Image: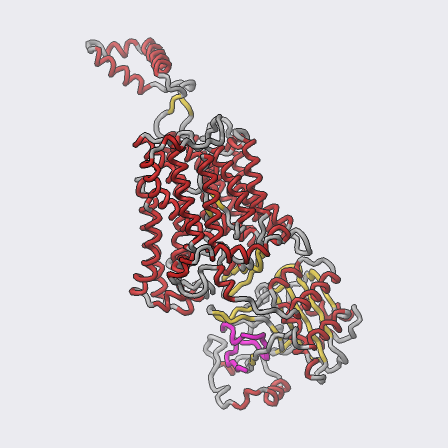
Amino acid sequence: MKTKKEVEEMPEVTVNQFAEESPSTGRSKNGYVFQEMELQDKEQEDFKEGSPATDKEDIYDKDMDIYDNDKSDSEEPGFGLLNTTRKYIKPMNFQEEVRAHRDLDSFLAQASILLDAKATTLDEVLRRMIAHMAEDGHGSCDVEEVITSLFTDAGGKDNNVHLLSETIQGVTATTTGIHYQQSWLCILSNMSKLQRRHVCIARLERPQNWGVNCCEARYVILILAPPRTKSTKTAIELGRTFSTMFSDISFRQTLLETKTQEEFKQELVLQRHQLSIVKEKPVVEEVEDSDPRKGKPLEFCDFLKAGKGVYNDLRRRLPLYPSDFTDGITGKDRCLLKYTTTALFLYIAILLPAIAFGSLNDESTRGEIDVQKTIIGQSIGGVIYALFAGSPLVIPLTTAPLAIFISVIRGICDDYNLDFDAFYACIGLWNSFFLILGGLFNVSLLMKLFKRSTEEVIALFISIAFVGDAVKGTVKIFEHFYYGPTLTTTNRTVVLQEINEILDKFENQTTNVLEHQIGNVSLHGHGKSQMSVLNLVFLPESLVVCTRERPVLCLLLMLGTLWLGYTLYLIKRSPYLNGKIREVVSDCALPISVVIFSFIGSYLFIDIQLPVFSVHDGPVFKYPSFEKLTGLNALSAVGLGFLLALLIFIDQNIVISLTHVPEHKLLKGTAFHWDLMLTGFINILMSCLGLPWMHAAFPHSSLHARQLAKVEQHVENGHLYTTIVSVKETRLTSLAAYILIGLSTFMLPIPLQWIPKPVLYGLFLYIAATSLDGNQMVDRMTLLLKEQTSYPPTHYIRRVPQRKVHYFTGLQMIQLIILCVFGMYPLPYMKMVFPLLMILLVPVRTSLLPRVIESKYLDIMDSQYI
């Protein structure tokens, strides 16, 4: 038991396991400010007799400043001394303690449950709960008397400041300090007039802010008990039972979905059953072997155990395969609406990048790989991955680095007169060969060397690359259309004929002026005068395409898509509408934004011709003619295939790692080795059919996990935090999205060509903006712009000196700048060695940074499992 001497703490508070102390604030746990208060005589006597802290001599030695004025504290009206005690209580063990089952069985039949209470203040909620208990026939108590027992009324009748006398609240001790479970509160009281115990549970219609440590209150548990009773039947013992049940975040989320009291009670019974099951100890070694990031240190012999990683992945993942299709479809916890909105989100988020990168491939390969082939390739490869991958939440795509790689291959083919289809397929086969070998020989174990900071630098680079693609596309539009008139035709004869007609007409109207200007001028001089006349004459509308309206409209469409999409994405944090509608709108933010601004650009401004992608006629699948390549050509493809495999290996494994971060609470584990081998098999098919390669893509995979997540929000020190409760690990959403993408080929060219390129660029900006959530490096970069008093209470702020934090952030920014310089340099061949540069980030983190910052601080800021 700890005694706190700060006046700000709450009196006689009983806290759940792990609790030690809460931040010193000016508000109590129930949200009432300590203002004018007096300790009544009876309370003082009770304290002297019952508090174990009275033996300490210096308990009241320190002065306590409550008011900042010239008067001494003792002269202030309502001045008093407030004693606060806190103690740990163990959660109820439903497996061993019989009383837990008896408590629940005896009270379920007579428990009073109040659903969707509309009261806002704690006082009002408690009064309704007491009245509800009386209505249910649980005894007749005087409401005012019960309220008096629940609160420590320090100010008497003249003051409306109340502090709860005794509560239980769940807390967790982490490296960031003490974190309160702010969505529920258990309130206890002993009533001398009661003959037996009474329980009332209230679920509020909306989360209520009752002050520090109770900012998102949704459940209130009221327990009243007689003071003299058996030790196993006290109010605290009963509070332990219900508090243990409500400490489960998944259980609280399930209770939100109940609609009747009977459903509510059934969930209580089911939760009791879940807590009573004797859980066998998990096989830790098997879980560690399935995830390269965990387990024993890396050893060379691990790479010689051919096929062990793939075997372990399949052995562990195959038993869970049926649940990938049934979770959220069968049983009580159905998520059909969530699955539908997520599938629509993925459909748009995959289709539009496929169109953008397909258009880029179309330009670089001169039609060899166009938009249609890209869309079909995404559909085929995506369906295979969704059906057989060990990490179904991961989304494979063709990406910008792959598009650049393809353009480099096209340039090599032009320089050395090679057949593009055959050389492309040959490089792809070598790439797949290296990927399959990597899966067989457990090369993914190298992920042990990649720290969180390294992964976040690469992830942030990918987000910046999306922004760069959008900016470059918009700049090209401005360069092409904003400066100088654009002619409707490139036929020089037609253009010169119309210009001559204009000049002749103008000369006839200004004969006298022209004769004065060109009286004795040579033929060359006459040409110059014609040009000067031309500068004075506007070209006809039939000859000129509108120019400046087009780039300005493109800029507005791009920014508008970003603005509307991101605004709708954040609506889930707003008070507008109800929670279900906010969730649906937030999940469908991207499709809504794309549809609206495509309509604006293609219909409302139909007079302004916007840039769209082109569609070619011809066979989709084209088997390569390998006989057109010599043996030396095939051998030269080995180096390019290895560099491509290195790029895919890094991106694939980092994306899987970022998708399976502990914050997402994914339970089915990873399959790094099998997924790498599966990617190799998919790219064999892509290479032989002349379709673009693909690999796991960021941030689509992380966004997919967040779309399927159930979350709970809490406020701590003025900062809003979102905690993921659970994530549905299903294959259905990605499978449905890829099937829809395959069907989209029937919408070529119309209506897909109604989506202007600026809307695609807006999509890139949206993906980049939403991917920043949860990136610790971005959070630390924002600290450089904040004052110290507004720093969030994160683990690195609490445990690492501030200067070290900023040093580390600055070093990460230097690494990011180097990646951006090499990754975005216009020289194509430099991009081919870019994967080697990403590999160099590993020794920088493991060898160079520890010489600048102590290893213990690096490990804290790099901690993967906070």
The answer to whether 351 is drawn above or below residue 157 in the figure is above
In terms of image quadrants, where is residue 483? Answer: top left
Q: How many marks?
A: 0
- Picture coordinates of residue 168, whole percent (x, y): 61, 74
* Residue beneath the point at 38% across and 44% down: 644
Depth check: 317 or 543 in front? Answer: 317
Depth check: 389 or 271 in front? Answer: 389
The answer to whether 532 is drawn above or below residue 857 in the figure is above
Identify the main secondary structure in magenta.
loop
531 part of magenta stretch: no
Q: Is residue 522 left or right of residue 594?
A: left
* Residue beneath the point at 61% across and 48% down: 339
In terms of image quadrants, where is residue 33? Answer: bottom right
The answer to whether 644 is drawn above or below residue 476 in the figure is below
- Picture coordinates of residue 335, whole percent (x, y): 64, 51
Residue range corresponding to the magenta coloring:
1-23
- Picture coordinates of residue 669, whole percent (x, y): 53, 58
Depth check: 153 or 342 in front? Answer: 342
Q: Is residue 478 left or right of residue 378?
A: left
